[in-house]
Image (spheres, grey):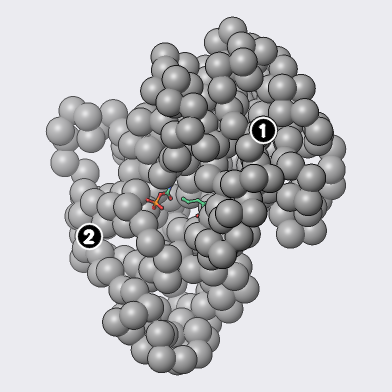
Amino acid sequence: MIRHFLQFRDLTRDEHLYLFERARVIKSRFKRYQPYHPLVDRTLAMIFEKSSTRTRLSFEAGMHQLGGSAIYLNTRDTQLGRGEPVEDAGEVISRMVDIVMIRTFEQDIVERFAAHSRVPVINGLTNEYHPCQILADIFTFIEHRGPIHGKTVAWIGDSNNMCNTWLQAAEVLGFNVHVSTPPGYEVEPERANLYGTDHFESFADPMDACRGADLVTTDVWTSMGWEEESDERMKAFADWQVDADMMAVAKPDGVFMHCLPAHRGEEVTAEVIDGPRSVVWDEAENRLHVQKALMEYLLLGRVES
Ligand code: CP
Ligand code: NVA
C-alpha cells in the first residue's frame, strides 16, 4: 500500500518516533560528511502553488544528498495553472517520478492528487496543515529538551495551518497545547481534523497560555492566501505579539520557535526571536534532516543502516 504524508496523523506515534530517531542518524552522518545515497535513481517532483524558501531548498537539497534528483514545478509554468484537473496531474506526474511534494491552497487538492497517485505524496503546506514543519519542530524540541510526551506547547496567534498541525501532533504524541488567539480567530476542531479536544485548552489572555509552557511558538498573522485581510489582522492581533513578558512566565528552560519567515515587531519581538531561548535556526535546519528521514521511510520503509 502506498503511504502518503498529507496530515500529521497519517503516521502513527511509533512511526513518528522512528522518524525522529532516523533523522538523528541521518543528521549526524551528514554532519560528519559521510555520503549516504539510499535513493539513487529516485526522482522527487516538487509542485509549488505558493512561495517558499525553506521547503524548496530542504526538499531539493535533501533529495540530492540522498542520491536522487528533484524537479521543481510551479503553477505558472505548468498546465495546472491553465486548469488541468488535479486528478489528471496526479495520474501523469506519478507515472514519471517516485515521490511527490505539493505546496498548495486547500487540503482537498493534495488529497485528490494523492487519490490518483501511484507514488507517495507529501504535504509541503496547505491552508489547513504544515506537517513537515511540525516534524522539524518536534525533532528540534527533542534535541534541546528530550521527549515531548506530557509537555506543554503554547501557541500564540492565528489558528492557522501550523496551529492545526500542532493540535494533531499533540493527539498523536501525547502532549498539551495551550492556544491563545484573538476573538474571531479561534481554533476550529473540525478544520484541524481532531479526534477530540482533550489535548488543547484555549486561553483568552496569551500570558495565561504561556504560563508554565515548555515551548512558546507563533507564526505570521497573515498566512499565504489571506493577504487581503492583512490590515484587519494587524489590528486584531496587536496584543498577541510574543515578547519578553510572555517568555518570562513560561518554564525557565522554555524555548521559542517560529517556522519562519518571521516579522519582527509583529508576531514576535526581535528580543525574543534573536534571544538566547530562540531555537529558530536549528528548527529551520532540521527541515532538511526530518524530510530526508521521511522520504527514505515512504520509499524504503524502515531501514537498519
Ligand atoms: N517554514 C516554511 O515552510 O518556510 P518556506 O515558506 O520558506 O518554505
Ligand atoms: N502559516 C504560514 C506558514 C508559512 C511557512 C503560511 O501559510 O503562510
Q: Residue 239 carries which label?
A: 1
- Taking depth in this image into account, of 183 and 27 the one nearest to the observer is 183
User: Please, is residue 177 above or below residue 36 in the view?
Assistant: above
Residue beneath the point at 31% across and 33% down: 27
Residue beneath the point at 38% across and 68% down: 48
Task: Give whichever of discs 2 and 1 has the lower sequence position.
Answer: 2
Horizontal relation, residue 113 to residue 107: left or right: left
- In the rendered image, residue 219, in percent from the top left (x then y), is placed at 54, 42
User: Please, is residue 165 above or below residue 89 in the view?
Assistant: above
Residue beneath the point at 48% across and 22% down: 272
Q: Is residue 249 visible?
A: yes
User: Image quadrant of residue 73?
Assistant: bottom left
**Amino acid, disc 2:** Gly
- In the rendered image, residue 83, in percent from the top left (x then y), is placed at 46, 91
Seen as rendered, the residue at the extreme top is 252
Q: Does the residue labelled 1 lie within 8 Å of ligand 2?
A: no
- In the rendered image, residue 25, in percent from the top left (x then y), is placed at 34, 32
> What residue is pinned by disc 2?
68
**Element carrying mark 1:** helix
**Amino acid, disc 1:** Asp
